[in-house]
Amino acid sequence: MNATPARQFQPLAEPESHTIALTLNGKQLQLAVEPWTTLLDLLRDHLDLTGTKKGCDHGQCGACTVLVNGTRINSCLALAVMQDGAEVTTIEGLAQGDQLHPMQAAFVAEDAFQCGYCTPGQICSAIGMLKEGHAHSEAEVAEQMSGNLCRCGAYRNIRAAIERARPDCQQGEGRE
């Protein structure tokens, strides 16, 4: 038997971080991030904004939903380097001091949460959905929010909260 000599592998060079600029909850930031860092991990692990939740880490539960340039996205599926120049809004950026965003206030008024784990993603998704101009009926709201799971089953109250907040969010009073 003639054995082939083992290949000599060179260690990979240390990966370079990339500097990105983004507006996060109204504040401009410049950050050095590794190319594989997701937006969710940047928010939670590097910036200590833990309101955005890590649920499935596969884009299937919606717990990580944030707004990027006003559009709802699953932050677990978005690389941080791809957000260079973007405006990112998390649950922490919705209230103005002690004044809740209309969607947050509606969630409280309608008791649209139980354990609260999915609530930040539900709220961000609802704001994005209304901004997108979707959801003209209860069935459309249910369909548009189907990517945001609630294990406690508070869907009826979540839909009621969205309906309560709809006028304020669609008239531009609901800030993002």
Image: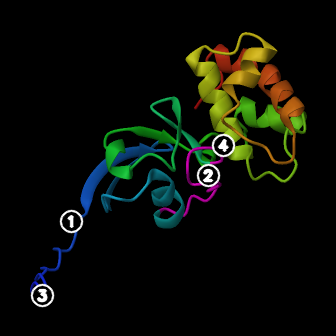
State the residue at coordinates (70%, 38%). 122
Q: Nearer the viewer, residue 146 or 95?
A: 146
Instruction: Look at the image and say whether residue 157 sits in the magenta stretch.
Output: no
> Do residues under tags 2 and 4 come within 8 Å of each other at their CB atoms?
yes
State the CA–CA distance, disc 2 to disc 1: 27 Å
State the CA–CA distance, disc 3 to disc 4: 56 Å
Could you tell which of marks 2 and 1 lies nearer the N-terminus? 1
| Amino acid on which the number 4 mark rests in the picture | Gly
Instruction: Provide the residue designation for mark 1.
Output: 16
Instruction: Provide the residue designation for mark 4.
Output: 121
State the CA–CA distance, disc 2 to disc 4: 7 Å
Magenta range: 47-63
| Amino acid on which the number 1 mark rests in the picture | Glu
Are there few (<14), some (14-19), or many (20+) residues within 10 Å of tag 2?
many
Are there few (<14), some (14-19), or many (20+) residues within 10 Å of tag 1?
few
* Rendered image quadrant of residue 55: bottom right
> Do residues under tags 1 and 3 come within 8 Å of each other at their CB atoms?
no
State the CA–CA distance, disc 2 to disc 3: 54 Å
Q: Vertical placement of 126 versus 34: above or below?
A: above
The quarter of the image holding the N terminus is bottom left
State the CA–CA distance, disc 1 to disc 3: 37 Å
State the residue at coordinates (22%, 68%). 15
Secondary structure of the residue carrying numbered label 3: loop
Residue 108: percent from the left, percent from the top?
85, 39
Secondary structure of the residue carrying numbered label 4: helix
Secondary structure of the residue carrying numbered label 2: loop
Residue 47: percent from the left, percent from the top?
48, 62
Residue 92: percent from the left, percent from the top?
62, 48
Instruction: Provide the residue designation for mark 3.
Output: 3
| Main SS of residues in magenta | loop
